[in-house]
Amino acid sequence: MDKQQLLKDYKKQEDKICLSQVLDKIEFSKTRDKIEYTDFLDMYQVALVENFLRKIKFENYQLYGGYEEAERKILIVYPEKYDEQMLQKNYNKMIKVIRIMLPEEEKGNYSHRNYLGGIVKLGLKREKVGDIIVKEEGADILTVEDFSDILKQQLPSLTRFETSKITIEEIQNLQKREVKVEEIKIIVPSLRLDNFVSDLARTSRSKAVQIINQERVFVNGQNETKVSKLLKLNDKLTIRGKGRFVIKEFAGTTRSGRTVVVIEKYV
């Protein structure tokens, strides 16, 4: 497997580094005849890796984030002898849950930003941490297994968590948040992606184009940089830093010919 040849079409250095690490995991899994897995990949990296593995026709892998709707996922590479049941037995060895239980007086006060901000403030590696599931009473933070002890030890040093109860839990004990959505209506001049991003991110068309070009927009889990892409019914749209949305209905047109769109926004 000529690594340089496989990566020659990728221009961005960070893409090459990510995919080079993937190729290393594939090689290690093959030579050691055992499961290998990466740190957490963000949505852009997940799409990048999926497309790359499809391109090189490699099939012995899974992308796993701890639960079905996870945005951040690890790549698991395995020998052919492993089946789904064997893989599931190994999930506990890959991902753990750091559970933060807030004291009574702090419940409901913290958002996703507070938890992620604490991790960043500690100088800890973001790629070691997966999704952060926020609840009224605290949060479940997914992390790769070899980082769980470090995170548990470091979090109480933050003032905001010094009186919280912090434990390490197995992945099967993950407490998923109840999915809540609110219905909103927007009016767009056309079904182009930049129109949706502009309205949903509450910004100008030119700024929306910048957001798309910055690779912060995903359609059905795939990074999308074509501003003129036409969206359709049931498409799932993620704008990093702005939220997740689903196109639920095209509800007619205005007198000026604009389209009224019913959107479900995850809250």
Image: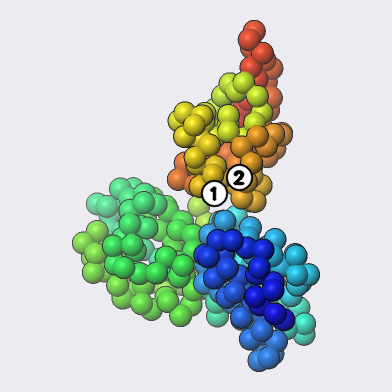
Q: Is residue 222 left or right of residue 267?
A: right
Q: Secondary structure at mark 2?
A: loop
**Counting residues from the N terminus, which is met first, the one under dot 1 or under dot 2?**
1
Measure how far apart labels 1 and 2 are at the Cα level. 6 Å
Name the outermost residue toward the left: 159
Q: Secondary structure at mark 1?
A: loop
Q: Position of residue 117 (x, y in %)?
A: 33, 57
Can the viewer see residue 6? yes
Q: Tell me the residue at 39%/52% (across/down).
A: 112
Q: Position of residue 132 (x, y in %)?
A: 45, 58
Q: Tell me the residue at 66%/77% (across/down).
A: 3
Q: Are marks 1 and 2 in contact (CB under 8 Å)?
A: yes
Mark number displayed over residue 215: 1
What amino acid is found at the position of numbered circle 2 in the picture?
Answer: Thr
What amino acid is found at the position of numbered circle 1 in the picture?
Answer: Glu
Q: How many marks?
A: 2
Question: Around disc 2, counting alpha carbons within 10 Å, would you say few (fewer than 14), some (14 to 19), or many (20 or more)?
Answer: many
In the displayed structure, 179 sits above or below 207; it is below
Q: Tell me the residue at 77%/82% (across/down).
A: 80
Can the viewer see residue 89? no
Name the outermost residue toward the bottom: 32
Residue labelled with disc 2:
225
Q: Position of residue 208 (x, y in %)?
A: 51, 35
In the displayed structure, 1 sits above or below 167; it is below
